[in-house]
Image (tube, rainbow, N blue to C red):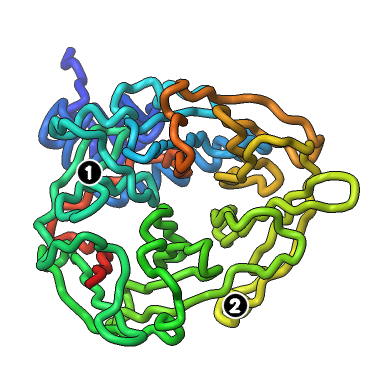
């Protein structure tokens, strides 16, 4: 009697089996043979795997959102190592890769610049940035990008002349940087353009956003536009706002702006949103929710929002991260920082959403169509 092995199975039948594996084994089984590695590495495999996982989650856990975490980085004023906090029990988050120890050794802490679709953009310095890594902490894979043409002290945004930017865009299609001179209406009236650099990059609908609280502006740049289109968007003008700081975040694919306000008897968090695509184009914000929060004499800031439920907020209060459930108005301390992380008056914190993808997003090989935007200040 002839024994049947996996090698005797057709590709279609083998794929039906592999699609039913959990995420980590399915990803690791690429190493079993060239045939398995080829089948699992095909884009069609990832698409079918994701479709199946979404369907299973919808049937078994209809109210549960995808596993996600927040990455924090404190500055006091020098950066501290990246910290990581998961909010749903998921074995994938147990990997030490989420502390970025797979990147090349560096005497200073890695700088977390932004994330999108399971990929993270990092650098080795705050100023004079030229070393960029794109990595996936789920798989520990990473790629080092070629140096940009110029290395300036402030390399996020700046003037070439009044109202113009020098935009450098790296494309993995060509493995090269291209440089554009872009006009940005109103930029000449921004008091300190370098303040755009002090807050994290926010990517939404393939458009990059930087916020400048001091000028009340968002700089939006579309790297897919052949002319490198950039524009300024006003932050909501909330007359009740207590602090200059406003939190810009994304929930369900829509930009959100959260502002702590003082009302007659209590503090409120006002949540503003662009309700329609036309509103985003016109810069028309709508006040969609008012969430009560306990009064406090301590510094209180909104630093992040839940990626699916816009009524779940994360606040920075003194040396703690507090979860605020806007549905029940209940709070819960979810993270404590070390004492030495807030020793200076100018200490600050950046927070980044990281949503676990149903299938690991591959780190782009050069010549494979990824864009990195790099705006320099002269």
Quadrant housing residue 120? top left
Q: How far from the left and from the top, in percent, is residue 357?
A: 42, 41
Circles 1 and 2, Cβ within 8 Å, touching? The answer is no
Find numbered disc 1 in the image and state the secondary structure of the residue it sits on. Answer: helix
Residue 368 visible in the snapshot: yes
Which mark identifies residue 145?
none
The label number, if any, that marks residue 41 in the structure image: 1
- Residue 90 x/y as whole percent: 48, 24
Out of 14 and 317, give the one closest to the viewer. Answer: 317
Q: Residue at x 30, y 84 (%)?
A: 182
Total numbered badges shown on the rendered structure: 2
Question: Residue pushed farthest right?
Answer: 265
Q: Is residue 196 above or below residue 117?
A: below
Q: Is residue 93 left or right of residue 291?
A: left
Crowdedness near tag 1: few (<14), some (14–19) or many (≥20) residues, C-alpha within 10 Å = some
Q: Is 345 drawn above or below residue 331 in the view shown?
A: below
Whole-Å distance between the Cαs marked 1 and 2?
A: 41 Å
Q: In the figure, 280 relative to 208: above or below?
A: below
Between 226 and 302, the one nearer to me in the picture: 302
Q: Is residue 348 visible?
A: no
Q: Relative to 255, is 61 above or below?
A: above
* Place of residue 186 in the rendered image (x, y in percent of width and height, measured from the top left): 46, 84
User: Residue drawn 29% across and 27% down?
Assistant: 97
Please name the residue shown 16% across and 28% down the image: 31
Mark 1 / mark 2, whichever is N-terminal: 1
Could you tell me which secondary element the residue under label 2 belongs to? loop
Crowding around mark 2 (Cα neighbors within 10 Å: few <14, some 14 to 19, many 20+) is some
**Quadrant holding the C terminus:** bottom left
Residue hosting label 2 = 283
| Res 210 quadrant in image | bottom left
Q: Where is residue 354 shown, x and y percent of the image?
A: 44, 41
Apparent side of residue 290 relative to residue 245 in the rendered image (left or right):
right
């Amino acid at each position: 009697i002839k024994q049947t092995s996996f090698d005797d199975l057709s590709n279609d039948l083998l794929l039906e089996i592999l699609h039913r594996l959990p995420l980590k084994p399915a990803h690791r089984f690429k190493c079993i043979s060239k045939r398995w590695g080829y089948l699992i590495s095909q884009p069609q495999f990832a698409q079918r795997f994701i479709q199946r996982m979404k369907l299973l989650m919808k049937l078994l856990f209809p109210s549960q959102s995808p596993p996600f975490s927040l990455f924090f980085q404190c500055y006091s004023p020098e950066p501290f190592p990246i910290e990581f906090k998961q909010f749903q029990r998921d074995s994938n988050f147990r990997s030490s890769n989420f502390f970025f120890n797979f990147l090349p050794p560096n005497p200073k802490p890695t700088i977390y610049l932004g994330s999108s679709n399971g990929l993270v953009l990092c650098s080795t310095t705050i100023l004079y940035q030229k070393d960029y890594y794109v990595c996936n902490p789920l798989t520990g894979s990473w790629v080092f990008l070629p140096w940009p043409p110029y290395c300036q002290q402030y390399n996020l945004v700046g003037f070439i002349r009044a109202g113009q930017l020098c935009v450098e865009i790296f494309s993995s299609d060509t493995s090269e940087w291209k440089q554009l001179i872009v006009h940005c209406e109103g930029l000449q009236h921004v008091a300190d353009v370098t303040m755009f650099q002090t807050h994290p990059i926010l990517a939404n609908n393939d458009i990059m956003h930087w916020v400048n609280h001091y000028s009340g502006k968002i700089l939006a740049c579309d790297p897919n536009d052949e002319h490198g289109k950039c524009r300024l968007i006003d932050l909501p003008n909330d007359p009740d706002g207590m602090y200059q700081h406003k939190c810009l975040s994304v929930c369900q694919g829509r930009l959100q702006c959260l502002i702590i306000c003082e009302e007659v008897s209590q503090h409120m968090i006002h949540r503003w949103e662009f309700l329609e695509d036309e509103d985003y184009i016109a810069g028309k914000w709508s006040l969609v929710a008012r969430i009560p929060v306990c009064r406090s004499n301590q510094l209180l800031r909104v630093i992040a929002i839940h990626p699916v439920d816009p009524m779940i907020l994360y606040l920075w209060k003194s040396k703690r991260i507090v979860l605020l459930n806007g549905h029940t108005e209940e709070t819960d301390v979810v993270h404590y920082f070390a004492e030495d992380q807030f020793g200076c008056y100018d200490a600050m914190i950046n927070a980044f959403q990281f949503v676990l993808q149903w299938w690991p997003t591959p780190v782009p090989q050069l010549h494979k169509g990824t864009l990195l935007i790099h705006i320099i200040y002269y």
